[in-house]
Amino acid sequence: MELENLLKQRNAYAGKIIPLGVKIAVIFLIPAALVVVSNRVWNINYFITLPIAFILSWSGVIWLYRKMSAEVRALDVRIKKLRSQDAHQKTLESSKGKDANSVI
């Protein structure tokens, strides 16, 4: 039962593509808006602020990717562990059945 829940959680990440796209758009929009505001209000040159916005945007995207990747990896590890436990348990049950038949 727990294995099925973990598989559903892992597969649910495929359904999170649209919200993820919106998050990435916001990550790029905020620094870009700050560049425009800083140019209009304080008359700071774009050559100074655009590289900073670029670095901030991509740092945010990389952070988001690593966070989601770590969550999926953790789910995969738990799934693999549960599958190996189930396989080991089935092996033990089948070997007990063979031992009982050989005694008779």
Image (cartoon, grey):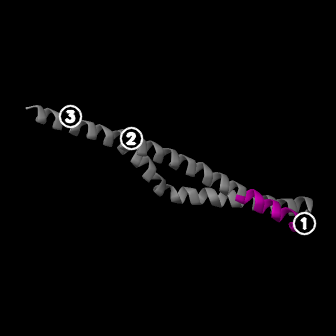
Q: Residues within 10 Å of mark 2 (few under 14, many from 20)?
A: some
* Extreme-front residue of the structure: 103
The numbered mark at residue 96 is: 3
- Mark 2 or 1: in front is 2
Q: Which residue is mark 1?
A: 45
Of the image marks 3 and 2, the number of the one nearer the N terminus: 2
**In this rendering, would 19 be left or right of 3?**
right
Q: Which residues are magenta?
A: 46-58
Answer with the quarter of the image where residue 103 lies. Answer: top left
Check disc 3 and give the amino acid type. Lys
User: Considering the image in quadrants, where does the C terminus appear?
Assistant: top left
Q: Which residue is mark 2?
A: 82
Identify the secondary structure beneath mark 3: helix
Answer with the quarter of the image where residue 83 lies. Answer: top left
Q: x and y percent of residue 51 in the render?
A: 82, 64
Q: Tell me whether the residue at label 3 lies in contact with that at label 1, contact meaning CB atoms closer than 8 angstroms.
A: no
Q: CA distance from mark 2 to mark 1?
A: 56 Å
Check disc 1 and give the amino acid type. Asn
Whether residue 60 is situated above or below residue 4 in the rendered picture: below
Q: Main secondary structure of the magenta part?
A: helix
Residue at point 42%, 41% (across, down): 81
